[in-house]
Image: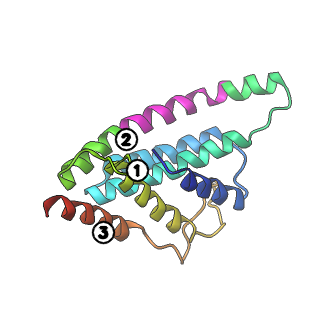
Amino acid sequence: MIDKALKERIYTWNRDRGLTKLYPSLEIKMLSEERNEFYMAYDPTHIVQEYCDFLFVYYGTEFKIGCTKYESMAMFKCWNSQCEDLFDFIYESKDTMQKRLGHIIENYIGYSGCDFVNNISLIDKIVNKALLYVIEANETKSAKKDSSGKVVKGNKYISPYERIKETLDFYKSKQTS
């Protein structure tokens, strides 16, 4: 379960950059890129980072869908038919990636289970921390966009990789001690 405050930060990030209009083909392109990077990732830290990058785009897409206004039922039907592939792609990708990620984290840290005190799964804790790091990294991006409409990283961007690695290693050390 993703923390609501993290989703709100992603919504704010999109709103602050004027990213409130949904372009289904651009969203599919960005989500496909993140999904491909997830499957091409080379170590558990990179896999977690790429999953969180996917979630960042996913919740940004969710925000844009919520911002979309319909002037008529005809416009809604037209928009809905354009977005059918987007919706199918999003939900299928997220579910498949989430299952794979869970297995990878469990294997890496040597644990599966739940923190019954806080009733939050360890995987959810790790993903929420990693997503926070990805959000913070994205907040260092400029507002400039490339020719396809994607926000570019810029000079101040700091990769969340090391912070995610520290988090994974922390939970791994807790399991071995």
* Of the pair 36 and 93, the residue shown nearer to us: 93
Queried whether the magenta region covers residue 88, the answer comes back as yes
What amino acid type should be assigned to the residue bearing mark 2?
Answer: Gln
What amino acid type should be assigned to the residue bearing mark 1?
Answer: Tyr
Q: Nearer the viewer, mark 1 or mark 3?
A: 3
Q: Position of residue 146 (x, y in %)?
A: 62, 60
Would residue 31 appear left or right of 169 to someone viewing this image? right
* Of the pair 117 and 166, the residue shown nearer to us: 117
Secondary structure found at label 2: helix
Q: CA distance from mark 1 to mark 2?
A: 8 Å
The residue to which callout 1 is attached is 51
The residue to which callout 3 is attached is 166
Would residue 88 appear left or right of 50 to someone viewing this image? right
Q: Residue at x 63, y 38 (%)?
A: 24
Q: Position of residue 62 (x, y in %)?
A: 61, 42
Check the picture and name the quadrant holding the N terminus: top left
Q: How many numbered discs, if any? A: 3
Secondary structure found at label 3: helix
The residue to which callout 2 is attached is 98
Q: Position of residue 117 (x, y in %)?
A: 34, 51
